[in-house]
Every structure is written in C-alpha cells, then in structure tokens.
Amino acid sequence: MNKIRDHIKSLEEKLLHSDLRKNPEMIQELLSEDFEEIASVGKTSSREEVIEWLVNKEKDIKWSLNGFRIKMLSPELVLAIYQANKYGNRDGHSPGSIRTSIWKQTGDNWKM
C-alpha cells in the first residue's frame, strides 16, 4: 500500500507543481472527464474552472502535502487525505487546508 500512496502523492504534486501551459496533455492524463472540486467553503468548481486555475496559477507557489495518507475504497479506487500548505507566495506560508481526492485506476493509469 505504501507504493500506491507514494504514487498517488506524486500525481497530486505533479498536478500542483507542473507548468500545465507547457504540458496541457497532463490535464487529460490526470483529471477524469467527470472531475469536480468542492472547496473548503463548500463552493463547487467544474473541471474547466479547475483547469483554468491550474494553467494560470503563479509559478512561484509550491505546496507541501503533509500527513499524506490513503484509504483503499476498492481495488481501483483510492481516497487521498492530506494537509496542503502553500509557500513561495508574496504572503508567506499559508496555514494550510485539509484536502481529499479520489483517484481511480484504469489499466496502469490513475486519474483524479
């Protein structure tokens, strides 16, 4: 299970830290067609809205994913749970937020 956890964590980091303007194919590789995000305040964002944010995010901002763990929901479904802390922005280090994501395996590939 550590191997799956490490792989899913690397995919989360890849989405956050990659320049998706230079690698737009990565979006199709990592986000499922029915992806949506629910923010900490309860606002739902569509796949397109999240892609827009990912493509246009500040390049200097990085995240640390602390306390990263997973729960196997089925052999092909994983729930990732972690605290995301933002750093490198003008405002300094963020207090962080608790995040979750569901990843589905299809063949050898995982998509959020």
Image (spheres, rainbow, N blue to C red):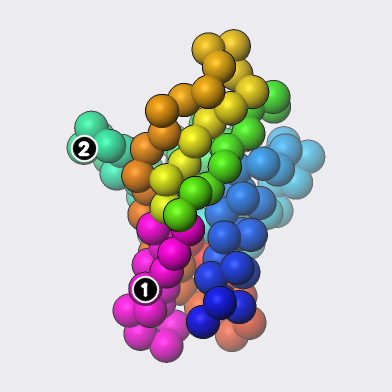
Left or right of 6 in this view: 84: left
- In this view, the residue in front, 30 or 90, is 90
Q: Amino acid at mark 2?
A: Gly
Q: Is residue 98 above or below residue 73?
A: above
Spatial separation of the CA atoms under disc 1 and disc 2: 23 Å
Q: Is residue 20 magenta?
A: no
- In this view, the residue in front, 35 or 18, is 18
- In this view, the residue in front, 76 or 92, is 92
Label 2 crowd bin: few (<14), some (14–19), many (20+), radius 10 Å: few
Would residue 13 be visible to someone looking at this image?
yes
Q: Which of marks 2 and 1 precedes in the sequence?
A: 2
Measured as percent of width and height from the top left, residue 74 is found at 35, 85
Q: Check whether the beta carbons of the residues at disc 1 and disc 2 lie within 8 A of each other.
A: no
Q: Provide the residue span drawn in magenta.
A: 68-81
- The residue at which mark 1 appears reads as 71
Q: Is residue 6 above or below residue 88?
A: below
- The residue at which mark 2 appears reads as 42
Measured as percent of width and height from the top left, residue 47 is found at 43, 46
Residue ID at (62%, 69%): 7
Tell me the quarter of the picture where residue 101 sits.
Answer: bottom left
Q: How many marks?
A: 2
